[in-house]
Image (cartoon, rainbow, N blue to C red):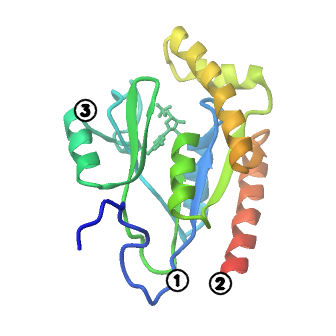
Amino acid sequence: EASSEPPSLPPSDPDRPPGLIIVLSGPGGAGKGTVARRLSQIDDRLVLSRSWTTRPQRPGEPDDAYTFVDAATFATAVDEGRFLEWAEFLGHRYGTPLQDPPPGSDLLLEIDVQGARQVRSRRADALLLFLVAPSDAAQLERLRGRGDPEDHVRQRIEEARRESDAARELGARTVVNDDLDRAVGEIRSIIELERRRVR
Ligand code: 5GP
């Protein structure tokens, strides 16, 4: 029967309990990318989702940081219902493709707060984490360090304030990225507790 409802997750085997969905959000310059990569390297059960974006690749940015697509390709994928969530961020679109990680694994998403809200509405049990820099100065330094133009840096700082308010509203758990190993360790224990709670 035809329905306008988006496909619900998980898309496959109804007999196996779905893996966790762990959403890592946070303002630009908080170090989300590094934390997400580290988590997926040290935890075999975590599968790091690769987002699609219409943003141009930054100089020096790895080819596999995103699936880089043009606006038309992204729009077609939206129409075909291929995204778990998608959002517009500073003029570009970013989306998480629907995917079915191998049995026993958990999916890690590094996405913005608008996306976190959509994930939460489709999967009420999603674990929402909000990573922040230890200070405004540290955040600025990270943003400048990756070579974005200065006006983008300012926009991202403003966006960061809106994101923090939204994250609080959503009840995301805040983790301070004061030290990479410590922050990664804290997130690992949160994930471990959640695994024990649901399995
Ligand atoms: P950047 O341009 O710095 O790579 O990413 C900009 C923002 O978009 C970041 O907050 C990043 O987490 C977010 N983002 C990356 N991929 C996705 C996605 O698939 N969905 C959503 N909603 N946000 C994303």
The location of residue 136, given as percent across then percent down, is 76, 22
Residue closer to the observer: 19 or 137: 19
Quadrant housing the C terminus: bottom right
Pointer 2: what residue? 199
SS state under label 2: loop
Q: What residue type is labelled 1?
A: Pro
Q: Along the horizontal axis of the image, is 185 left or right of 76?
A: right
N-term-proximal mark, 3 vs 2 = 3
Image quadrant where residue 112 sits: top right
Q: How far is the residue under mark 3 from the one under mark 2?
A: 40 Å
Q: How crowded is mark 2: few (under 14 residues within 10 Å), some or many (20 or more)?
A: few
Q: Is 46 located above or below residue 70 in the figure?
A: below
- The mark found on residue 193 in the picture is none
Q: How far is the residue under mark 2 from the one under mark 1?
A: 8 Å
Q: Residues within 10 Å of mark 1 (few under 14, many from 20)?
A: few
- The mark found on residue 17 in the picture is 1
Q: What residue type is labelled 3?
A: Ala
The location of residue 82, given as percent across then percent down, is 30, 55
Pointer 3: what residue? 71
Tag 2 and tag 1, C-beta contact below 8 Å: yes
Q: Along the horizontal axis of the image, is 12 left or right of 197?
A: left
Q: Is 88 located above or below residue 99 in the figure?
A: above
Residue closer to the observer: 92 or 193: 92
SS state under label 1: loop
The location of residue 186, given as percent across then percent down, is 78, 56
Mark 2 beta carbon near ligand 1 (under 8 Å): no
Quadrant housing the N terminus: bottom left
Q: Along the horizontal axis of the image, is 91 left or right of 132?
A: left
Q: Which amino acid does label 2 sit on?
A: Arg
SS state under label 3: helix
Residue closer to the observer: 199 or 86: 86
**Residue depicted at 57% across the width and 69% down the height:** 20
